[in-house]
Amino acid sequence: MQRPGRTSNPPVLTLSTPSLRVTVQLRTALVSIPYQCKELSVSDIDTEFWLETDASDYAMGTILSIKCPDGDYRPVVFSSHALSAQEHNYQVADKEMLAIIRALEMWRHYLEGARHKFEIWSDHKNLNYFMSSQDLNRRQARWALYLSRFDFTLIHKPGTSMTKADALSRRVDHAKGIESDNSGITLIKPEWIRAQHIVVEAEEGQILDRIRSQSSDLDLRGN
């Protein structure tokens, strides 16, 4: 039994000659990319690399590109990760640096010990904060130690030239729940506070005499 509005024979999509020609050209262009620019192996450590990173308020995006035989750099690996609840509270410079650290951790087997110095592109000037002497916290000190394992050059690029990494750091599905992040939160909840009552059974004069006696003892010990 057929549903209303449906036919037993679906329409056949027919391409005109110009459309078919464009489709064939597009397919040919996609499959004609040199093999070594389509996937990486550990043996590609001699390849020249280029890393793009970007961070938003709630996510980070990274792209690893390699230099192909024709001299152009082409992206081969992409990554997009949401920030954790704790990482949402990082300063902007820390978020940008976190994106770099995460990218180096993911692709360490390509970048650590690579024959050629590679470039890291970032579109945020706040990274200049780390280019002068600072009193680093423990997290930043760990980052500094990890960065020392790589041979790279950090380059600031305008946002208009970082559209791919920017898009990866702003995926809509990563933004869920950030609208009310850190808003309307009680730091110390009432149930965490417990009052302690002390009941002293004695005459008022006796209590005062005991307090004076203990105060005298403390004065003598202090002398």
Image (cartoon, grey):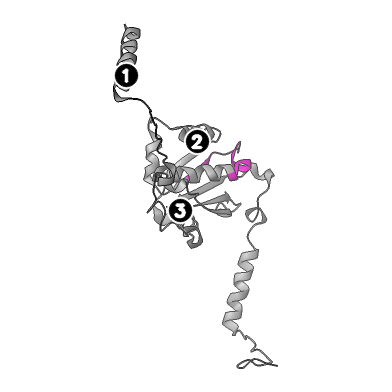
**Depth check: 84 or 76 in front?**
84
Magenta segment includes 112 = yes
Residue drawn 52% across the image and 47% down it:
51
Q: Nearer the viewer, residue 176 or 16?
A: 176
Q: Amino acid at mark 2?
A: Trp
- Is residue 30 shown left or right of residue 84? right
Q: Give 127 or 15, whichever is nearer the viewer.
A: 127
How far apart are the alpha carbons under marks 3 and 2? 20 Å
Judge whether 5 appears above or below 67 on screen. below
Which residue is most to the top?
223
Which circle marks residue 58 in the picture?
3
Q: Quadrant of the N terminus?
A: bottom right
- Measure the C-alpha gap from mark 3 to mark 1: 59 Å
Q: Which residue is mark 1?
A: 211
Q: Secondary structure at mark 2?
A: helix
The mark nearer the N terminus, 3 or 1, is 3
Nearer the camera: disc 2 or disc 1: 1
Measuring from the top left, give residue 191's x and y in whole percent: 43, 46
- Foreground label between 3 and 1: 1
| Residue type pointed to by label 3 | Tyr
- Name the secondary structure under disc 3: loop
Q: Which residues are magenta?
A: 106-120
Q: Residue at the location (34% across, 15% down)? A: 214
Does residue 108 lie above or below 16 as drawn? above
Q: Is residue 24 above or below residue 143?
A: below
Q: Position of residue 110 (x, y in %)?
A: 62, 43
Closer to the camera in the image, 210 or 168: 210
Please tell me which residue is depicted at 51% across the width and 33% down the height of the picture.
142
The residue labelled by disc 2 is: 143
Residue 86, image x, y percentages: 47, 45
The Cα atoms of the two marked residues, 2 and 1, are separated by 56 Å
